[in-house]
Amino acid sequence: MTQAFSVIGVQHGHCHDMVRQLTGAGAKLVSVYEPDGERANRLIASYPDALAVSDPLEILDNPDVSVVVLAVLPRERASLAIEVLRAGKHVLFAKPAALSMKELADVEAAQFASNRLWTVFYSEHFLSEATRHAVSLCHEGRLGQLRHLIFSAPHQLKPETRPEWFFDKARAGGILADLLTHQTQQLLSITKAKTARLTHSRIERKDLLQTRQFEIAGE
């Protein structure tokens, strides 16, 4: 039986990657909710059997939909994921899935109560052959005993193509929520660790493009 899934939000470009991966695995996109008609149409154009819906409840109330892809603004993801889980559906997030420890705890509580799955699509792992190869080399012991790891993650500014919300930390979460999530996931994958502890962080802000102190660097 073909798994049916829907999309709520096409605000993040990784939405297209997630849909391609799911359809490539045999699932079927049946509906999309996105208030921005242009964004919705760009996605649906590649999947003519999918329908644009005017209310996310049309997705949450559809018993045929088992998985929901969330690519709304980062600030909205945790609260919406809770609604999706409570509706009895699995959730696939664009990263980051949450912007605070409380949001994360609330999503995990909803996941536990619903007995459904939620997971984050880390494109820098799943779409990167180099990353997957590096993980395999470490797991096979071909690089020797692991002692130390350093990650570098430059990010292109691209103000002409990025949405306005990307430059607003309150809505996007800032540089660590955006990029460090990738490196943390890779760290856990390479080391096979279940948890990691943050001991230091630093953010560099700069007035840029008339934004509110855009974060240009973090460690």
Image (cartoon, rainbow, N blue to C red):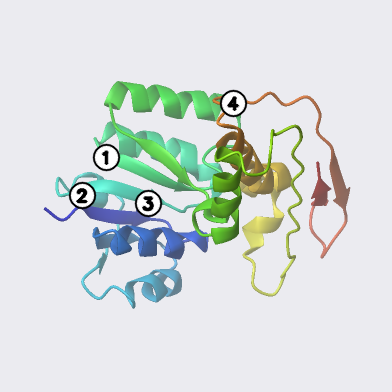
Alpha carbon separation for disc pair 1 and 3: 10 Å
Alpha carbon separation for disc pair 4 and 3: 22 Å
Alpha carbon separation for disc pair 2 and 1: 7 Å
Look at mark 2 in the image and give the residue it sits on: 65
Horizontal side of 57 relative to 169 (left or right) equals: left
Residue type at the position of mark 3: Val
Q: Residues within 10 Å of mark 2 (few under 14, many from 20)?
A: many
Alpha carbon separation for disc pair 2 and 3: 11 Å
Of the numbered discs 1 and 3, the one sitting upstream in the chain is 3
SS for callout 3: strand
**In this picture, is 155 found above or below 184?**
below
SS for callout 1: loop
Horizontal side of 120 relative to 201 (left or right) equals: left
Q: Residues within 10 Å of mark 4 (few under 14, many from 20)?
A: few
Nearest the viewer among 182 and 96 is 182
Look at mark 3 in the image and give the residue it sits on: 69
Look at mark 1 in the image and give the residue it sits on: 89
Residue type at the position of mark 1: Lys
**In this picture, is 59 found above or below 186?**
below
Q: Is residue 57 visible?
A: no
- The residue sitting at 52% across, 64% down in the picture is 13
Of the numbered discs 4 and 2, the one sitting upstream in the chain is 2
Look at mark 4 in the image and give the residue it sits on: 101
Of the numbered discs 4 and 3, the one sitting upstream in the chain is 3
Q: Residues within 10 Å of mark 1 (few under 14, many from 20)?
A: many
Of the numbered discs 2 and 1, the one sitting upstream in the chain is 2
Residue 61: x, y in percent? 19, 45
Residue type at the position of mark 4: Met
Alpha carbon separation for disc pair 4 and 2: 29 Å
SS for callout 2: strand
Residue 90: x, y in percent? 30, 40
